[in-house]
Amino acid sequence: MLTRNKTPFVLTLARLSCALALALSTQAFAAAPAPAAAMVKSPGAPDLSQAEFDASKQIYFERCAGCHGVLRKGATGKPLTPDITQARGQAYLEALITYGSPAGMPNWGTSNALTKAQITSMATFIQHTAPTPPEWGMAETLKTWKLLVKPEDRPKKQLNQLNLENLFSVTLRDDGKIALIDGDSKKIVKLIDTGYAVHISRISASGRYLLVIGRDAKIDMIDLWPAEPTKVAEIKVGIEARSVETSKFKGYEDKYAIAGSYWPPQFTIMDGETLEPKQIVSTRGMTVDKQEYHPEPRVAAIIASHEWPEFIVNVKETGKVMLVNYQDIKNLTITTIDAAPFLHDGGWDSTHRYFMTAANNSNKVAVIDSKERKLTALVDVGKTPHPGRGANFVHPQYGPVWATSHLGDGGVSVIGTDPVKHPQYAWKQVTSLNGQGGGSLFIKTHPNSRHLYVDTTLNPDTKLSQSVAVFNIDKLDAGYTVLPIAEWSGIKQGALRVVQPEYNKAGDEVWFSVWNGQEEESALVVVDDKTLKLKNVIRDKRLITPTGKFNVYNTQFDIY
């Protein structure tokens, strides 16, 4: 597992997938110890000691590669190849790393995430030729697979008294754990060791198994039925990853799991009850726009189709969506749909037929018809859309719509999704809302709510990063209300950021993470959705750097 830097660290969650990312295992990618006097030299770049190079390499993979790419060719973030960085110069690069930008570049210096010395070293490091990590195949994968409890040795029914449908899986990013929290009592049920910086939690179709994946590509499978939730299997599917999903088509519930890797660029299909690896498929290939070979097309969002026995896989850099049919994994059938680069995150429309996915650097949302298995539309939206899974609601004029916020501007794009009763609005941006500012990672609502929540986690303005905007769905033209979430937490010290609204099962509470440094206090803030008033603050010394929160019921049934 990755060795973690103990300096206070603040930021991210999806552009977790962006600026924070590639937690390469030091075991897999660390160079052999070099003599103290050894220097790294690249044409046109300032010399850097081997020790500084290795330390900066680790920081880059943990915090930068998710946006800028392992090979620094760019995606959500801009390319950082030596021809570009050397032209910018040392001073410019140090200033950008320190202060960030409203377009979503984190302010690593003023947030106290990196020291001045680390920033200087990073500015030099990115002027050097990017190192290439090793490959990771079936042999390496099998070595990491552990079946901790065999299926036949697991309970036949739920043995605990937990209300599993209102259980939350909360990522404790820099502690390498998740916290299972009872949504009714607001108490921590159990902490479970996981991979580093869990990106998402997913629930199996049966609601029994919780799967989490860390940025170090480690998957942990947790059985929620024993007397207390128990890890039953684990595996590492590469060096760095973001996505995991389970089969949900009727007759295939819990049969398969799939995980996508950022490095190497590939996905792995596994047994749904044991995580035994079955197939590894590379995603390297040609881009949709220039028809050029790309060596690093990473797997971003994966979603399970309800229309066919298929996984829908976003291939980031190539801009292609792969429909992976799992009826016969020994004779795997894959349908490739051209969309637009760079595909990132997304979710279902309200009918669970259309996959709405951000092509963030193209400033578009691709609409994939999972029933007809084809591209329905490419919708122009604001700068660098980053929806998470997006937000579905019924607009008073345009009918059913889906919305995304943006990293690059303060707008909220609203897209019509009803081709039957509102065909004139379907697959068009029907309106745009003015939010607080750029740097938004997540937008959220619920079928039982009339509110729409938008965070601004990556905005360099602390007033924005520590609060959220709330729109009344019935009065969207009235603008938004600001909720001072960080202030409500009661935490007085640290570079606090507020990230990711998540509803409880009933849809009458919204949970927010108040994310602080690793050595500082963090919290969860619970808001009453009806009144927009503070309801609860969960403060516990075990809540170290909480970020993503996933309600079991809402995640299981794709409710957002």
Image: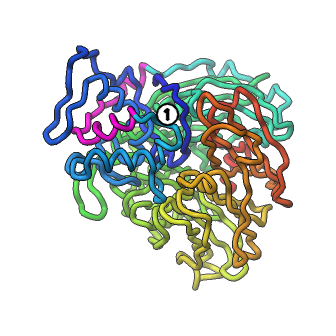
- 64 vs 46, nearest the viewer: 46
| Residue found at x 45% / y 56% | 101
**Is residue 440 part of the magenta span, yes or no?**
no
- 34 vs 223, nearest the viewer: 34
Residue 169 in view here:
no
Q: In the visual, does 149 lie left or right of 309?
A: right
Q: In the visual, does 32 lie left or right of 402?
A: left
Q: Position of residue 237 (x, y in %)?
A: 44, 31
Q: Which residues are magenta?
A: 117-143
**Is residue 123 part of the magenta span, yes or no?**
yes
State which quadrant residue 187 falls in. top right
- 236 vs 109, nearest the viewer: 109
Q: For the residue marked with disc 1, what is the amino acid? A: Met
Q: How many marks?
A: 1
- As helix, strand or loop, the secondary structure at mark 1 comes to strand
Classify 177 as above or below 165: above
Where does label 1 land, which residue?
A: 270
Q: Position of residue 116 (x, y in %)?
A: 41, 36
State which quadrant residue 517 falls in. top right
Classify 526 as above or below 407: above
Classify 142 as above or below 560: above
- 460 vs 247, nearest the viewer: 460
Residue 510 in view here:
yes
